[in-house]
Image (tube, rainbow, N blue to C red):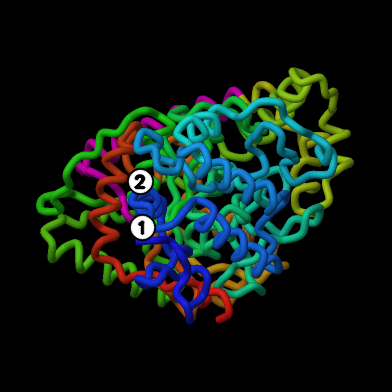
Amino acid sequence: MQAHPAAHASPTVLEDGMDLLELDISAARAGLLRRDFSCEEYVGALVDQAQRHEDLHAWSSFDPDALRAAARQEDAAGRATDASLPLAGVPLAVKDNIDVAGMLCTAGTGAFRDRMPARDAGVVAALREAGGLMAGKTILHELAMGITSNNAVTGAARNPYDPARSAGGSSGGSATAVAARMVPAALGTDTGGSVRVPAAFCGLVGLRPTTGRYRGDGCVPLARTRDTAGPMTRSVRDAALLDALITRDDTLPTIDLSGLRLGVPASFSQNVDPEIAAAFEAVLQRLSRAGAHIVQADMAGRDELNGQIGFPIVLYELERDLPPFLAAEGRELSLAQLHAGIGSPDVAAIVAQQLGDEAVTTDEYQRALQLRSRLQGMYAEHYRQHRLDAAIFPTCPLPAPLLGLDVTVPFNGMESPTFLTYIRHTDPGSVAGVPGLGLPMGLVRGLPIGLALEGPPHSDRFLLALGERIAADLPPTPPPFPARAGS
């Protein structure tokens, strides 16, 4: 068909009823290849959506005119209809701690306000090689050290389902941009839950790959032995596509739920919001009816052991790795100078620990690494002993908190530490380096909630295939607001 808006519909809706804003990458590419619409029309609809919802504060840097011009160039060069380029004509958002050549990369902190990398990060280069358009950079929790993205330097990324609430973190702006239909997908980073937590808050799919599966060059380091980039999408098939393009691994097994053994950590399924618990139980019942074996199996001592590992590794590696990363591009910056540019009180307090008497020593760091090896062995033995194919649990014990609750959050009649409460389920697997996949599990009180899958190291493609099978039986998560212009 000739691509043009229907006479009495929004510019995002074609005359056959196709809404450009609701297309995932796979559907958008199919439409471009069929010439149902041009790249300029598709990108224009997304740009208009981003400008309509500037109040959600997804972007740290975004140039609508440049993105529209890039779309016109795609059409003129015929790239958008080139079947050999799986991302041609598709705009992607990038978290502002991942380098994109020619775009500021600030890590959301004051000391990096003018940092302009000359080269793409490895993960960005892979997606650009596949034809992807880099739409802009997204807001994050300052230095990626938190889960609310309530950043005092850039302002807070807001949840499209309730702008008074957090979009999650630290990849909050990426989640906002994808959930609000400004782009079909984005890159985030995950050190302890920073892709999966915002995915849960915003009704998205988020993948934390096995540590080391993705190239880490061009990503501002927080903890190099824990950090990884990861895709955030609105469908599992898109997450699998981006993962395949980054890793050149496109294997995807066929999943039969009958006979699969899925472990449920009791400590992750208990002491959660009652409505999240009910939604999770409904998922388990559906899986059981489909033939999956639900195995109640926890790891004794896991959380206590994990608590001795995470922060020592982060603080020590931040101090040792960030200055050389910057020095390689001619920028000299000490940890004290970095601290001086931090605007968010919660982040400043964390970094200050490494500047004072509580600084993690080399001996303490080496002990943390030894304990991590023990934790990794615990995971391997757990999967072996219970013959598990994957673990399954709610991503977070609560829906998204109100913005401003950066220190404590009401939970079961008490004030609980916000950061530790929300990463309770995602952090241990992150420290162990195993892959994790977050799926949308519906709404609770109008807010999205997430379902998490974890597997042994390097089971990423299996998890994606399993996630796609499970997602087919989950209730669809509605968009946060009517996405059509003029609504």
Q: Is residue 102 something that shows in the picture?
A: yes
Q: In the rendered view, does 315 fall on the left or right side of 390? A: right
Q: Is residue 380 something that shows in the picture?
A: no
Note whether 392 is above or below 56 in the view shown. Answer: above
Q: Secondary structure at mark 2?
A: strand
Note whether 249 is above or below 109 in the view shown. Answer: above
> Does the segment drawn in magenta span residue 379?
yes
Q: Which residues are magenta?
A: 366-392
Q: Quadrant of the N terminus?
A: bottom left
> Does the segment drawn in magenta span residue 401?
no
Question: The residue under label 2 is which amino acid type?
Answer: Glu
Q: Considering only order in the chain, which callout, 1 or 2, is on the residue closer to the N terminus? A: 1
Q: Which residue is mark 1?
A: 393
Residue 53: % across, % down? 65, 68
Determine which of the numbered discs, if any, sits on residue 248 in the image.
Answer: none
Q: How packed is label 2: few (under 14 Cα within 10 Å), some, or many (20 or more)?
A: many
Q: Secondary structure at mark 1?
A: strand
Q: In the rendered view, does 303 fall on the left or right side of 51? A: left
Residue 433: % across, % down? 45, 34
Q: How packed is label 1: few (under 14 Cα within 10 Å), some, or many (20 or more)?
A: many
**Numbered marks: total:** 2
Taking depth in this image into account, of 319 and 436 the one nearest to the observer is 436
Q: Quadrant of residue 113?
A: top right
* Whether label 2 touches label 1, CB < 8 Å: yes
Determine which of the numbered discs, if any, sits on residue 454 in the image.
Answer: 2
**Residue furthest front in the image:** 2
Taking depth in this image into account, of 73 and 172 the one nearest to the observer is 73
Residue 376: % across, % down? 40, 32
Q: Quadrant of residue 55?
A: bottom right
